[in-house]
Image: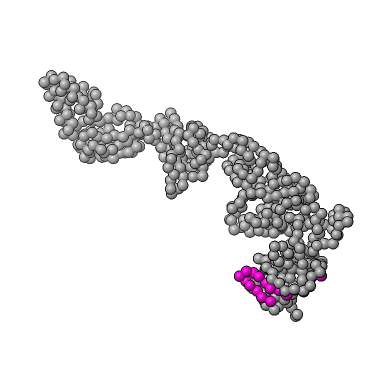
């Protein structure tokens, strides 16, 4: 579902729930009569069922043709700012459930993808010690399997010919020092021991010298072809082993604090369903990739059956180190609004309050609470829509609070309109219920009021609330006056 559709659904649900809460949290006439002995039984005002800002001093119809609902004074009020008291009947009707904040060990797993590659520590790179020409190449392409001692290439090098001649001269002179020096030079040029022994025995110089594979494995790189001229410093080829493989994976920047060497790791392959490999994290690389914002991690796997092949993709699961005795609440109890994270704190006796919390790690259906709760608290774990549909950064249960602002409905005339400050100067008629005479004063227009449709010197009937400011909540243009 797209975010736009989801937002529309939330708005519709919020409007419907707002009306439901208005009705549920308002004492009905029958209940009021039973429990309000000695109290004023007259309604404070009448409100539209589908719009709680549409208020009147007497019964009537809403703009949608529905009967206005009477709102009575509450017999019980919230004890502090931001708190709301809900009757047990309403709690049952709304299926409000609470759970205790608890401490538990919280662990999570990081799932990512990785790829299998050669063990870099065991790759053998073949470099020449002399310059010369490749007379014959015994391996042809990357991926070829090679065995230790297998011929790789044949080289003609004048330098190797000269080194052989030096040994024969030393042998002819029977000079042990020269013999030892000549043999050492041949070894330094990577000529094998059996080649030197045969040269010493047969005394025949070979113009083309064959070089052999130093280990068993797979040809990872091949940078030469038949007839190439090579010289020291060149990497002719690389041979990697398959008996042990490296696995590298990428983890997001936000998870770097959770991983360290020694954590258990599981690996699965789509190529081998149902089979799992286990290992331990060996390395967390210290450098963050500035483009992908990820960090590399690595571990090794033995590969006796050669099932793991270089460049295979793998599914990786890293078990992070558990957080001991974390203070947690169920994940569904936290209301995440983007800028704020809140929970509904159950204070007892039907009193609730929305409080800000600082979240930590989330795992196993729980969220760690770093700040905002204690182990003695209880939070609402269901019916979270009661807050989500009504709250914002500044509302803090304002639509659920039982206290109501003083409210009046009166006729008047608009003298001036300031759209920049949304200020209306209105000359109003007397307000009988407050014993107030007629007056001219400034009012603040509610954000719901469209100022463009208002006209100066036009008679109106309007409703307003008395709080920190006089706020106009409803305006009706009167005709024929």
Number of numbered discs present? 0
Q: Nearer the viewer, residue 423 or 350?
A: 423
Residue segment shown in magenta? 415-432
Q: Residue at x 54, y 37 (%)?
A: 320
**In the figure, 170 relative to 155: above or below?**
above
Q: Residue at x 16, y 30 (%)?
A: 161
Q: Nearer the viewer, residue 9 or 386?
A: 386
**In the figure, 166 relative to 410: above or below?**
above
Lateral position of residue 224 relative to residue 452, left or right: left
Q: Residue 20 in the image: x percent, y percent?
A: 74, 56
Q: Nearer the viewer, residue 39 or 194?
A: 39
Given the current orientation, which residue lies at the most extreme bottom position?
480
Q: Tell me which corner region of the image, top left, top right, bottom left or bottom right, holds residue 146.
A: top left
Q: Nearer the viewer, residue 353 or 46?
A: 353
Q: Is residue 430 magenta?
A: yes
Lateral position of residue 421 relative to residue 46, left or right: left
Q: Residue 167 in the image: x percent, y percent?
A: 16, 25
Q: How is the image coloured?
A: one colour
Quadrant occupied by the C terminus: bottom right
Q: Residue 475 in the image: x percent, y percent?
A: 71, 71
Q: Residue at x 71, y 66 (%)?
A: 470
Q: Is residue 140 visible?
A: no
Q: Is residue 263 visible?
A: yes
Q: Tell me which corner region of the image, top left, top right, bottom left or bottom right, holds residue 220.
A: top left
Q: Residue at x 73, y 46 (%)?
A: 347
Q: Is residue 412 magenta?
A: no
Given the current orientation, which residue lies at the most extreme left position?
173
**In the figure, 209 relative to 476: above or below?**
above
Quadrant occupied by the N terminus: bottom right
Lateral position of residue 326 relative to residue 314, left or right: right
Q: Residue 190 in the image: x percent, y percent?
A: 24, 29
């Amino acid at each position: 579902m797209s975010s736009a559709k989801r937002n529309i659904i939330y708005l519709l649900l919020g409007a419907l729930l707002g009306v439901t809460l208005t009705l549920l949290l308002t004492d009905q006439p029958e209940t009021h009569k039973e429990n309000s002995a000695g109290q004023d039984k007259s309604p404070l005002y009448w409100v539209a069922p589908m719009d709680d800002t549409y208020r009147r001093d007497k019964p009537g119809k809403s703009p949608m043709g529905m009967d206005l609902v009477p709102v009575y004074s509450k017999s019980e009020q919230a004890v502090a700012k931001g708190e709301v008291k809900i009757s047990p009947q309403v709690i049952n009707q709304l299926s409000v459930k609470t759970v205790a904040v608890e401490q538990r060990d919280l662990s999570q797993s990081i799932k990512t993808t990785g790829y299998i590659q050669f063990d870099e520590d065991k790759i053998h790179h073949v470099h020449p010690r002399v310059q010369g020409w490749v007379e014959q190449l015994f391996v042809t392409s990357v991926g070829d399997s090679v065995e230790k001692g297998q011929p790789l290439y044949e080289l003609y090098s004048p330098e190797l010919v000269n080194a052989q001649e030096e040994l024969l001269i030393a042998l002819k002179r029977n000079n042990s020092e020269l013999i030892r020096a000549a043999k050492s030079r041949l070894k330094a040029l990577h000529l094998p021991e059996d080649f030197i022994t045969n040269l010493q025995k047969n005394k025949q110089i070979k113009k083309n010298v064959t070089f052999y594979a130093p280990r068993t494995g797979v040809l990872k790189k091949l940078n030469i072809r038949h007839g190439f001229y090579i010289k020291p410093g060149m990497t002719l080829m690389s041979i990697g082993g398959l008996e042990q493989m490296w696995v590298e994976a990428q983890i997001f920047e936000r998870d770097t604090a959770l991983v360290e060497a020694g954590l258990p790791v599981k690996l699965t392959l789509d190529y081998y369903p149902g089979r799992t490999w286990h290992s331990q994290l060996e390395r967390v690389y210290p450098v963050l990739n500035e483009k992908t914002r990820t960090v590399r991690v690595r571990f090794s796997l033995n590969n006796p059956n050669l099932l793991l092949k270089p460049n295979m993709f793998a599914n990786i699961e890293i078990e992070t180190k558990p957080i001991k005795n974390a203070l947690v609440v169920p994940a569904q109890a936290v209301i995440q609004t983007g800028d704020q994270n809140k929970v509904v704190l159950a204070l007892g006796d039907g009193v609730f309050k929305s409080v800000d919390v600082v979240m930590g790690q989330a795992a196993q259906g729980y969220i760690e609470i770093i700040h905002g709760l204690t182990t003695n608290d209880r939070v609402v774990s269901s019916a979270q829509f009661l807050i989500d549909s009504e709250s914002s950064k500044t509302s803090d249960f304002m639509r659920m609070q039982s206290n109501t602002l003083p409210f009046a409905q009166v006729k008047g005339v608009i003298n001036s309109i300031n759209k920049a400050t949304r200020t209306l100067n209105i000359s109003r008629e007397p307000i009988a219920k407050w014993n107030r005479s007629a007056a001219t004063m400034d009012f603040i227009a509610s954000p719901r009021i469209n100022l463009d449709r208002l006209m100066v010197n036009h008679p109106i009937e309007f409703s307003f609330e008395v709080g920190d400011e006089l706020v106009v909540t409803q305006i009706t243009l009167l005709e024929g006056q």
